[in-house]
Amino acid sequence: MSEEEILREAARIQSSRRKRVAKTCQRCGKDFIGVTQAKYCSDACRMAAARDVRARPASDPEHAYHIHLKPQLPGESIRDYWVRTFDRPLTEEDEEVIAAMERIQAIWDRIGHAVDDSTEMIRRMREERTDYLAKL
Ligand SMILES: [Zn+2]
């Protein structure tokens, strides 16, 4: 796989994330059309929800969960890692994201990047996942 093909794959994942679906606002309960990760119908609801999160005490276990990600075990697959660390069963969308991440990792493994690059890749995947969880 060439660098170009990897970039194409990344672009494909990006665009699949922009797919718009029917959603229910988690703040006001209104139905709306948004990207798959969208949680709120409007900026007003998104900001109101953010204010609620900030008002929450730092010791709130749900809040803490998003900050303290468990480390991936040596040799553990991305999917096993998600299964082990998620507090709910994986959805079809989770499975798609995992499958895409595993395809990209397989490509990186095949082209034999330096250890530093793999470490960087894993760090980025953790960030991606944190970002993804934050948008749920
Ligand atoms: Zn709303």
Image (cartoon, rainbow, N blue to C red):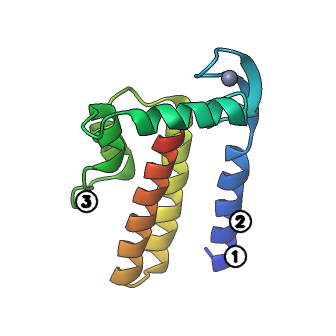
Helix, strand or loop for disc 1 = helix
Does residue 110 sit above or below 82 in this rendering?
below
- Disc 2 crowd, CA 10 A, few/some/many (<14, 14-19, 20+): few
Instruction: Report the residue at 48% width, 72% height from top.
Output: 108
Number of marks in the rendered image: 3
Dot placed on the residue nearer the N-terminal end, 2 or 3 = 2
Q: Are marks 2 and 1 in contact (CB under 8 Å)?
A: yes
Residue 77 falls left or right of residue 8: left
Instruction: Report the residue at 42% width, 79% height from top.
Output: 117
Query: What is the C-alpha distance between the residues marked 2 and 1?
Result: 6 Å
**What label sits on residue 4 in the rendered view?**
1
Which quarter of the rendered picture does the N terminus lie within? Answer: bottom right
Q: Is mark 3 within 8 Å of ligand 1?
A: no
**What label sits on residue 8 in the rendered view?**
2
Question: Based on the displayed image, in which of its 4 quarters is residue 47 positioned?
Answer: top right
Q: Is mark 1 within 8 Å of ligand 1?
A: no
Residue 57 position within the rendered picture, expressed as x and y whole percent measured from the top left: 31, 35
Instruction: Report the residue at 48% width, 31% height from top.
Output: 52
Residue 85 position within the rendered picture, expressed as x and y whole percent measured from the top left: 29, 40
Q: Which residue is mark 3?
A: 75
Instruction: Name the kind of residue labelled 3 in the image.
Output: Gly
Does residue 128 sit above or below 106 in this rendering?
above
Instruction: Name the kind of residue labelled 2 in the image.
Output: Arg
Query: What is the C-alpha distance between the residues marked 3 and 1?
Result: 27 Å
Residue 12 position within the rendered picture, expressed as x and y whole percent measured from the top left: 71, 55
Residue 18 position within the rendered picture, expressed as x and y whole percent measured from the top left: 73, 45
